[in-house]
Amino acid sequence: MKYRRPRGTKDILPDSIYKWHFVEKTIHEVMNYYSYYEIRTPTFEYTDLFIRGVGSDTDIVGKEMYTFDDKGGDSLTLKPEGTAPVMRAYLENSLSAESPLQKVYYITQMFRYEKPQAGRYREHTQFGAEIIGSDDIFSDLELISLASSIYKKCGIQNFKLKINTIGKTEERKSYVNLLKEYFKKHYDELSNESKIKLEKNPLRILDSKNENDKMIIEKAPKITEYLGKDSQERFNSVMKLLQQNSIEFELDSKLVRGLDYYTDTTFEFISKDLGAQDAIGGGGRYDGLAEMLGGKNIPGIGFGSGIERVILAAEKGKFIFPKSKGVFVFFISLNNDSKELSSKFVDELRGKGIVCEFDLLGRSLKSQMREANKIGAEYTYIIGENEIKSGSGILKNMLDSSQKSIEIQNIVNFISELNENKKS
Ligand code: HAM
C-alpha cells in the first residue's frame, strides 16, 4: 500500500464509530445539564497565542507544536490545546459584555508532535470546559463534578482524582527558585532530561518518571509549605468543599501540570487501566491567562480530556457501548420492478424514522438473505415477479424464521405498526 496515515494518527472506522457517537452525545448532554455552551474556535491560530498563553518553556511550545508559515508569511500553529484559543475568543469577541460569567465547552481535534504510544497520539480529540469570570471556590467544585459526571456516564468505573495547588504566580516564582536551588545540589544525580528542565522549567522535574529523579523529588520542598495565607486557605476550602460533596480525591504535591498558565488549584483524573498515559483528563485554574493575552484580570478554570483515553478506560472497565439502531427490515428485491418498489418503501419508512435497507449490488436472493442476516436485520420482505403478480410479498421474522404473506400495498403500514408495537 503506497499511502499510509501519518504516524501518531488513527482512522476511526465505521464499525467502532458508535463508541465515539455515544461519548460525544453524552458530553453534549451533560454539558447541557450544567448550562455550558459549545464554543468552536479555528483549527489553527497565530503561533504567538500559544507562545504567550501556554509558555515558551513548556514541552508543548518547545517541542510539540505543528507550526508552519502560510503563503502570506504568517506563522500559524495547529491547536495543541484549547484554553488559550478559548480565552482569545472570549477577549476578541468581548464575551464579558454579554455576561460576566461564561461557561463554555468544546470537542475538537488537537495536534501535538509527541512520541506516539498507547493512548498518546499526534492528533487526538479533546473535549474540555472552561468557566471564565469566576474565582469562586464553587466553580472549582463545579468543574471537577462536571468532569467526573461525564466520565461516569461514559462508563468509566475506575478513576481517581488527584489535586494540588500551585499558588499565585508570584508565590510560584519564589517556589521555583527554591526548587532550582534544591535540584542544583543534586545536579549530578539527576537524569539528563531533568538536567535540561532545571534551567528551562524546574517545576516539570517534579513529574519525572525516572526512578532516581523520583527519590530526589521525594525530599524536594513542597509548594504547599510555601504558599501565602490566602492561597493556603483557598486550597483548604476547595478540599473541604470536595469532601462535603463526597468527591474523593488524593492530594498530590507533585502535580504541577505541563502548561504555564495555571494558578492555584490543579487537578488530574487518573485511570490505572490506561498504563503509562494514565491521565484521562486534567485541568486547573488560570487566573493570569487573560492578562497574559492582553486582557483584563479575569479569572478562569477548566479541564480537558482525550476522548481516545475515555473510550479506552471505559472498555478496560468492561463497559459495553450502546450501538445505534440496527436495521429493522431488509427489502429483498429480485428484479427491477421489485427493486423500484423496495426503494419507494424504504424511502417512506426511513422518513418515519424506521431503519430499512435494500440491495444496491444486484445480488441473488441467497446473498441478499445472507447480507440481511449479517447486518442483523429483524425482518426481511421479499418481492419478486410472482409476488408482484399476486400482490403480496413475504415478510420473514429473522429471529424465529416465521413467515407471513403481506399485501404489497399495505406493507408500509404493516411495518410501521410492527415498529410501534416493538416500542411499547
Ligand atoms: P492537557 O493535560 O495537556 O491539558 O491535556 C488534557 C487531556 O488531553 C489529557 O489529560 C489527555 O487525556 C488528553 N491528551 C493530551 N495530549 C494527548 C495526546 N497526545 N494523545 C491523546 N490524548 C491526549 C490541556 O490541554 C489543558 N488545555 C486542559 C485545560 C483546560 N486546563 C484548563 N482548561
Image: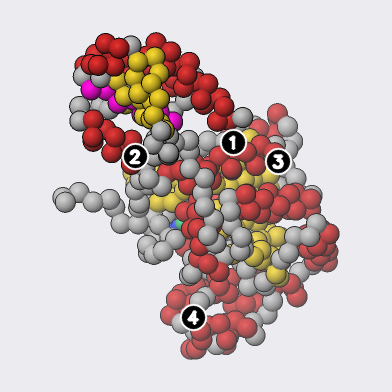
Judging depth in this view, the residue of 318 and 387 nearest the camera is: 387
Q: Is mark 3 within 8 Å of ligand 1?
A: no
User: Helix or strand or loop: what does disc 2 sit on?
Assistant: helix
Which region of the structure is painted magenta? 328-334
Label 3 crowd bin: few (<14), some (14–19), many (20+), radius 10 Å = few
Q: Earlier in the sequence, mark 2 or mark 3?
A: 3
Q: CA distance from mark 3 to mark 4?
A: 40 Å
> Depth-wise, is mark 1 or mark 3 nearer the camera?
3
Q: Is residue 240 magenta?
A: no
The amino acid type found where label 1 is placed reads Glu
At 69% from the left and 54% from the top, the residue drawn is 144
In front here: 134 or 397? 397
Residue corresponding to mark 3: 34
Disc 2 marks a residue whose amino acid type is Asn
Q: CA distance from mark 2 to mark 1?
A: 40 Å
Q: Which residue is mark 2?
A: 373
Which kind of residue does numbered mark 3 sit on? Answer: Tyr
- Which residue shows up at 57% across the image and 27% down it? 421
